[in-house]
Image (cartoon, rainbow, N blue to C red):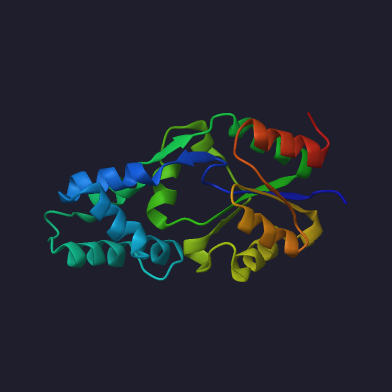
Amino acid sequence: MQIEFVYFDLGNVLVSFDPEIACRNFSELAGISTDRAREVLYDSGLQDQYESGQITSRSFTQTLRQVLDLDAKRLPQDLVLDAISDMFTPIDSMVEVVELARRSAGRVGVLSNTCPAHWRWVRKQPWPVSQIDYDVKILSCEVMSMKPDTKIYEAAEKAARVRPERILFIDDKPENVQAAAERGWRAHQCLGGEQAKSVIEQHLGVK
C-alpha cells in the first residue's frame, strides 16, 4: 500500500545529541559536579516530566533551584534552558532525505519525545535541517504523551489524516518503532543519514 505520510523522529534521526554534554553544561552553570547534574536532570525523572508536558519551563527551572538550593541569580531560566539544550548537532544530509520523502509521499512530519527548550533551541539554529517546514509537528511536551505510549501515536494519526498503514515512521529506538508497527504503521529503526535515506528509498521506491 502506498505511503502517504512520513514521520521522522528528531533525536538521532534529524539531529544528533549527547546528554552528557547537557550535563557538563549545566554542571558548569550551577557549580556542581557532572554526576550531580546528571542526577538532578535525568536520574530524578525531571527531564522526563518536562518532555511529557507535566511541568512547564518555569517549573522545570524552579525545581532545579529548589533541589540545588540556588536562587534565580545563580540559575537564570534562559541560561538553564540553553545549557540543557546546547547538546545537538545537525545531520546535514537529512534535509535531502526529508525532501525526498516529501516528493514521494506528499507530506512529512516530526514525531518526537522532546521538551519546549530543546525544540526551540534546535529550531533557532542556522542549520538547514533546523529550517525544514514540516506539514505536521507532534511533540511529546505538547500532546502530554511520550513514545511508546499510545496517546502520542493517536495524535500523530489524527494529524496525518491518513490510514495507519499509509504512514512510514523512522525512529532510532526499537520500542518506539515496535509501538508504531503494532498500530499498523510501516515503522523502521535506524539513525539519520545514509540509513534513513536507504529506508526512504526502500519503502517509497525512489532514489
Number of on-image labels: 0
**Residue 162 on image: x %, y %:** 77, 59
Q: Residue furthest front?
A: 35
Q: Which residue lies furthest to the right in this view?
A: 1
Q: In this view, does 23 lie to the left or right of 116?
A: left
Q: In this view, does 33 lie above or below 180?
A: above
Which one is in front, 56 or 12?
Answer: 12
Q: Which residue is drawn at 30% across and 48% down?
A: 23
Camera sees residue 150: yes
Looking at the rendered image, the quarter that the C terminus falls into is: top right
Q: Quadrant of residue 180?
A: bottom right
Q: In this view, does 11 lie above or below 59?
A: above
Q: Is residue 205 above or below residue 134?
A: above
Q: Residue at x 14, y 59 (%)?
A: 72
Camera sees residue 78: no
**Residue 3 on image: x %, y %:** 80, 49
Q: In this view, does 17 lie to the left or right of 138?
A: left
Q: Is residue 133 left or right of residue 127?
A: right
Q: Which residue is drawn at 78% across and 50% down?
A: 4
**Residue 156 on image: x %, y %:** 65, 61
**Residue 97 on image: x %, y %:** 66, 34
Q: Quadrant of residue 147?
A: bottom right
Q: Residue at x 50, y 69 (%)?
A: 144
